[in-house]
Amino acid sequence: MFTGLSAFPLTPLVKGEIDEQRFAALIESLAASGVNSIGALGSTGSYAYLTRKQRLAATTLAVRAAGEIPVMTSIGSVNADEVMRLAEDAQQAGVRGLLMAPLSYQPLTADEVFRLYERVTNELSVPLCIYDNPATSGFEFTDELLVALSHLHHIGSVKLGVFPADPVEAAARVARLKSTLAEGVTVGISGDGQAAAGLVAGCDVWYSVLAGLFPQVCLRLTQAAVRGDAEETGRLNRGLEPLWVYFRRHGSLRVIATVAELMGSVTAPCLPFPLQTLTGDARDALRTTLEQLPLNRV
Amino acid sequence: MFTGLSAFPLTPLVKGEIDEQRFAALIESLAASGVNSIGALGSTGSYAYLTRKQRLAATTLAVRAAGEIPVMTSIGSVNADEVMRLAEDAQQAGVRGLLMAPLSYQPLTADEVFRLYERVTNELSVPLCIYDNPATSGFEFTDELLVALSHLHHIGSVKLGVFPADPVEAAARVARLKSTLAEGVTVGISGDGQAAAGLVAGCDVWYSVLAGLFPQVCLRLTQAAVRGDAEETGRLNRGLEPLWVYFRRHGSLRVIATVAELMGSVTAPCLPFPLQTLTGDARDALRTTLEQLPLNRV
């Protein structure tokens, strides 16, 4: 399930409670779009802000709404015992994969991160994607550690966060990872603004924020990259660049949540307090930018 | 309560559960030592790794064991509703002050941090210390933001994390803060290796990891600084420098927990998984260093 396009939808909130109707509508629309998998409760799905009960309810709802499309969900928590409970919950709810970032309060050492993944994967029955996201977890994986972790049981993919800007270096890194990671472990790119570069460099999957709301344009980009059409991939990516500028400036979550509010896909405010969607001039400018983007055109 | 020496003890764990007997013994020993306050469930007390139920139990126990010495406790959580519940729990348990770092999964903006403190302090009945700790929270306060926050209701202190190494710059910063923070808000230093510098620069309080296990030497250092004896402050601090080297290299929590294990004050392993105390050569070297330190001498 860790190949192609994986869409990460928002979990719309109303005063801290999940807006189940709009969440189900988002998932159903993704399932109908042809994405390869759905990452319910990724970072974009605000997993880290939800209680265990809310995470179970959202996962159950997502699996049901997704039908045949495989769903993965995040089991990250600062509390390692809670991680085990979340993994159990998610598997009971019928997910086909899991995601885990090494959340911590105290910055972790590589040895501690290894112990965490070792303990967690020993108890799993579905594959787990290693979630590299230094901006949220505070931990930076080395490729050496990713390779060591890939040999644990049940590791299915690595979701890269930090990625070389230089295309030659990027291709070399992906090739090196693919030749050293355990067999069958796929390499994924995240951070939408670098997704085209990641796919062209040989990544197997795009873990995508934008696809959680606009799967079609992301599918076209992914398919162009997979068939080796670097020109079309570049053209589609350049068309999205104005949005990537917002993602870099405000964080992808605040931007995609603002877009969803503007479209009426969610009720404003949809983010967990104190996170804020864009307001004032920035919101107006984003609205104008959106109208000029090729998001829904074929 | 936010002046002088504030001691931050470990919360010793045994397989994820609080070792209540040893925790109470640590608190009782601090209360008898003459420290000005006790920060139960600070970063050193692993608050972020504990459940709400565990945090309430530990706070209740700490308040009882501390007797007349005021206790403060951390109410930080990624989930803002949980912060409100933790504040309510702590106040019911009888704390005299609260600590809060702006915990988040997504990096926060200054505006979001302001909204968080505004909402929380609106509901309090005891003073709150703003907890600046970029290494754990991922957020860096500017002095401008600290000053703005200090004018909210119930702000009692700021606990500085990042601090200038240059003494002139340090004194200028503390003087500037003291003249611009709201009246009655004290300035505290944390990061034990820079505590002497902070106190000499004019900070009102040392939020201390070492004092959680060795209050006497920290009291002597604090008292020397408060009476303006920079020479004695420097002498005492130089005596502790070998320990600060360990703090910087491994993080103060891993080191103080190792020391507590070596002394038998807690059962090994005492930290929340996957955090590890020092092992092998590093542990042996720390044991040797400890024997040479003036920790218990008068």
Image (tube, coloured by chain):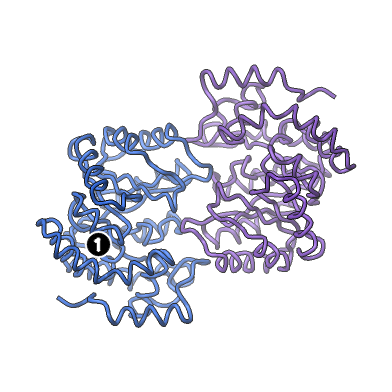
Chain colours: A blue, B purple
Q: Is residue A272 visible?
A: yes
Residue placed furthest toward the left? A227
Left or right for A77, reference A240: right
Quadrant housing residue A37: bottom left
Indicate the chain on which mark 1 is placed.
A
Left or right for A140, reference A37: right
Residue type at tag 1:
Arg
Q: Position of residue B2 (x, y in %)?
A: 78, 51
Q: The C terminus of chain B is located in which quarter?
A: top right
The residue sitting at 70% across, 42% down in the picture is: B61
The residue sitting at 26% across, 46% down in the picture is: A169
Quadrant housing residue A229: bottom left
Compared to residue A260, the image places residue B218 above or below, namely: above
Asked which secondary structure carries label 1, the reply is helix
Left or right for A271, reference A202: right
Q: Nearer the viewer, residue A67 or B250?
A: B250
Quadrant housing residue B112: bottom right
Q: Position of residue B149 (x, y in %)?
A: 68, 65
Q: Nearer the viewer, residue A237 or A76?
A: A237
Compared to residue B44, the image places residue A7 above or below, namely: below
The residue sitting at 79% across, 56% down in the picture is: B175
Q: Nearer the viewer, residue A26 or A92?
A: A26
Q: Position of residue A139 (x, y in %)?
A: 44, 44
Which residue lies under the disc numbered 1?
A64
The residue sitting at 25% across, 70% down in the picture is: A214
Q: Position of residue B9 (x, y in %)?
A: 68, 37
